[in-house]
């Protein structure tokens, strides 16, 4: 008795309560203690709201057995959810987006690189920020790592260097002439004050010297910066000697570069070949070198006068030979018109010279023997016999050899050299066998230079014959030079048969070999030859530079690897080889007869090829032009260190100078410190 539902066996008094929505134990409460709590889970993330729970026997739709969801509207938020960057606390640990945000950097200049000084953590790139840091200047959008370097005085690419590879080089323009100094530069993005965009100024201390200027003969400056000083003979000289005797022809020949007075300083010898103290015999003046404060005419030391009428004593001079091997330079004076029939004569006075001397007090003399032989018309010296004594080489262009003209005599040096020496006493006689029979000696000239072209340490001789012929009939008179390797044999030799090499001019009547000089122009350790052909191309004149290597590889024409052509200049009447600019390389000086001037060519700039326009420097190689006019001319020239300052100076003779006395002549000194 007491069963409330006799049709349901699970319902009776004291039955076990089970969750079936029935009051199984009939205590008046349905499913007490056996229901299950379910939590509302609207976002379906498996976690429901604790505050929204139902207790029932089976899980209702939209409910979860697990509560704890802090936000039942987002299925990414529940306990232990994976934290994602969405500005919510997905795992409900009290921290929003921990470990999943990105650091962004303030990018004020919008160059996509930010500054690490101001950062923000965010799930997405905020406006005004960049995802990459490292901007060293966040106020300039041209500055960031790897930026293209531009010229703005900033380190655009932040590599530690400012404006590398993008600046412009500017050149100091101290004189404000718009042309800069190559040796003083500044790299900048814009032209600095006091600088120029070019580097072509050769003197930045003078606004009157720059490439826009015209070359002036009145200055010692390279006014237009073309590498050439163009000096007028009437300007810029440092000393001058004039005379008051008409037709004295003072300055006909000048010679220097050696010490013949024994004081250790270079001396100068000047000749006056006109009607001087002994009629027209000729006078010689020896000036002692010294301090630049001493003018030449105040340093006159000693004199000598010829003793034969019309001899033109001093027509040639040699100041540097040491014929007695005493270590002191000796002086040789030529008188090519000496004798009743122009036989020619030479006087030698051994140094040191310490007083005036006369024809009877000279150390030795040399006498020509042939009518119109013109002995001593040209002379040179050197130890061509290899006996430690310099030998004297005298040219006699009028000395006949059968039907040929031209003889060179080598008088051997000796400690016993004295007295009158006839040509028959010469150690060696070299006779021309290639010159034509000519009626006037004004068409003929011989030249000579002593050198060591083969580098064996023994002096060689180059002998020039301006009418040397290239054919057996002596018709094609191009001019030739004959090279004799030293030591030169004694006896009688002929120019073509006994010479070791023959070099010929290019065309008939060129007068190749009219003048010569030698030196190591290419700085290879071997002497080269400079040869003048004054009548080249119908009087334009030419200067040939013949390299020693060309000499020893063959003979004949075409050996000159450098040719300077004149332009109506009569180039090549006179040649000198001197290191005029003191750079250690021999330079070449050459006369410009028709321009009354002289050009110096820088040896270090000489290269193979043909050049023209030397007087106007269109060749680009003449670095010093001495230009004259009808009054101021270069008749003779030599170099020496007259003021003993270590720099070569020039002395220029002009025998036709008219100082209120016709043809009285003068000599001018140009100090090397000026160029």
Image (cartoon, helix red, strand yellow):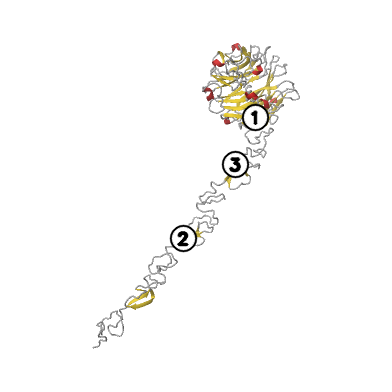
Identify residue for label 2: 103
- Residue wearing tag 3: 184
Task: Please state which of the two labelled residues, at mark 2 or mark 3, is closer to the viewer.
Answer: 2
Residue at 28%, 85% (x, y): give it.
26
Q: Report the front residue among 554 and 288.
A: 554
The structure residue drawn at horizontal position 48% and vertical position 58%, both measured from the top left corner, is 131
Q: Visible in this render: residue 363? A: no
Mark 2 and mark 1: Cα distance apart in space: 78 Å
The tag on residue 615 is 1
Q: Nearer the viewer, residue 174 or 408?
A: 408
Disc 3 to disc 1: CB gap under 8 Å:
no
Image: 498 above or below 542: above
User: Split into 4 quadrants, where in the image is the C terminus?
Assistant: top right
Upstream in sequence: badge 3 or badge 1: 3
Up the image or down, 48 lies above or below 459; here it is: below
One can see residue 482 in this view: yes
Q: Earlier in the sequence, mark 2 or mark 1?
A: 2
Residue at the outermost left position: 1
Do the numbered discs 2 and 3 sit on residues whose CB atoms are within 8 Å? no
Mark 2–mark 1 CB contact (< 8 Å): no
Where residue 171 appears, as percent x and y from the top left, is: 60, 42
């Amino acid at each position: 008795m007491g069963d409330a539902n006799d049709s349901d066996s699970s319902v009776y008094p004291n039955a076990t309560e089970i969750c079936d929505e029935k009051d199984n134990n009939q205590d008046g409460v349905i499913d007490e203690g056996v229901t299950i709590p379910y939590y509302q889970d609207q976002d379906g993330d498996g976690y429901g709201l604790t505050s929204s729970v139902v207790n029932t026997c089976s899980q209702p739709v939209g409910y979860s057995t697990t509560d704890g969801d802090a936000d039942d509207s987002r299925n990414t938020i529940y306990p232990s959810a994976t934290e994602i960057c969405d500005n919510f606390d997905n795992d409900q640990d009290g921290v929003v987006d921990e470990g999943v945000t990105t650091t962004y950097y303030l990018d004020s200049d919008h160059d996509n690189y930010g500054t690490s000084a101001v950062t923000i953590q965010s799930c997405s790139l905020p406006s005004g920020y960049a995802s990459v840091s490292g901007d060293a200047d966040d106020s300039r959008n041209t500055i960031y790592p790897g930026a293209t370097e531009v010229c703005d005085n900033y380190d655009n690419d932040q590599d530690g260097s400012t404006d590398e590879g993008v600046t412009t080089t500017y050149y100091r323009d101290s004189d404000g002439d718009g042309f800069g100094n190559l040796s003083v530069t500044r790299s900048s993005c814009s032209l600095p004050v006091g600088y120029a965009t070019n580097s072509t100024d050769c003197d930045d201390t003078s606004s009157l010297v720059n490439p826009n200027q015209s070359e002036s003969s009145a200055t010692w400056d390279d006014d237009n910066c073309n590498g050439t000083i163009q000096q007028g003979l009437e300007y810029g000289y440092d000393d001058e000697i004039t005379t008051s005797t008409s037709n004295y022809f003072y300055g006909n020949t000048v010679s220097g570069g050696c010490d013949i007075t024994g004081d250790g300083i270079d001396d100068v010898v000047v000749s006056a070949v006109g009607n001087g103290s002994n009629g027209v015999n000729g006078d010689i003046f020896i000036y002692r070198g010294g301090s630049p404060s001493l003018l030449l005419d105040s340093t006159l030391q000693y004199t000598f006068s010829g003793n034969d009428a019309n001899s033109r004593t001093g027509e040639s001079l040699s100041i540097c030979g040491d014929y007695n091997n005493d270590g002191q330079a000796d002086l040789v004076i030529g008188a090519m018109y000496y004798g009743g029939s122009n036989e020619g004569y030479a006087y030698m006075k051994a140094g040191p010279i310490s007083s005036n001397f006369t024809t009877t007090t000279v150390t030795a003399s040399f006498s020509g023997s042939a009518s119109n032989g013109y002995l001593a018309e040209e002379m040179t010296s050197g130890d061509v016999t290899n006996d430690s004594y310099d030998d004297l080489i005298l040219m006699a262009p009028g000395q006949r050899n059968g039907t040929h003209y031209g003889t060179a005599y080598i008088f051997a040096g000796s400690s016993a050299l004295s007295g009158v020496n006839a040509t028959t006493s010469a150690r060696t006689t070299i006779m021309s066998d290639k010159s034509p029979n000519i009626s006037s000696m004004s068409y003929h000239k011989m030249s000579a230079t002593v050198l060591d072209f083969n580098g064996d340490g023994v002096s060689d001789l180059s002998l020039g014959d301006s009418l040397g012929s290239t054919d057996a009939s002596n018709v094609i008179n191009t001019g030739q030079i004959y090279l004799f390797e030293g030591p030169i044999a004694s006896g009688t030799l002929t120019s073509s048969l006994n010479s070791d090499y023959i070099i010929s001019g290019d065309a008939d009547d060129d007068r190749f070999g009219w003048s010569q000089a030698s030196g190591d122009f290419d700085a290879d350790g071997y002497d080269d030859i400079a040869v003048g052909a004054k009548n080249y191309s119908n009087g334009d004149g030419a200067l040939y530079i013949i390299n020693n290597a060309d000499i020893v590889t063959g003979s004949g024409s075409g050996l000159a690897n450098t040719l300077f052509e004149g332009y109506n200049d009569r180039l090549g009447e006179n040649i000198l080889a001197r290191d005029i600019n003191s750079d250690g390389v021999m330079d070449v000086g050459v006369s410009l007869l028709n321009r009354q001037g002289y050009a110096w060519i820088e040896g270090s700039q000489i290269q193979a090829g043909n050049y023209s326009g030397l007087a106007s420097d269109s060749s680009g190689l003449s670095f010093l032009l001495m230009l004259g006019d009808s009054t101021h001319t270069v008749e003779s020239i030599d170099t020496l260190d007259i003021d003993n300052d270590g720099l070569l100076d020039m002395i220029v003779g002009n025998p036709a100078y008219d100082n209120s006395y016709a043809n009285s002549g003068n000599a001018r000194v140009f100090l090397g410190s000026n160029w």
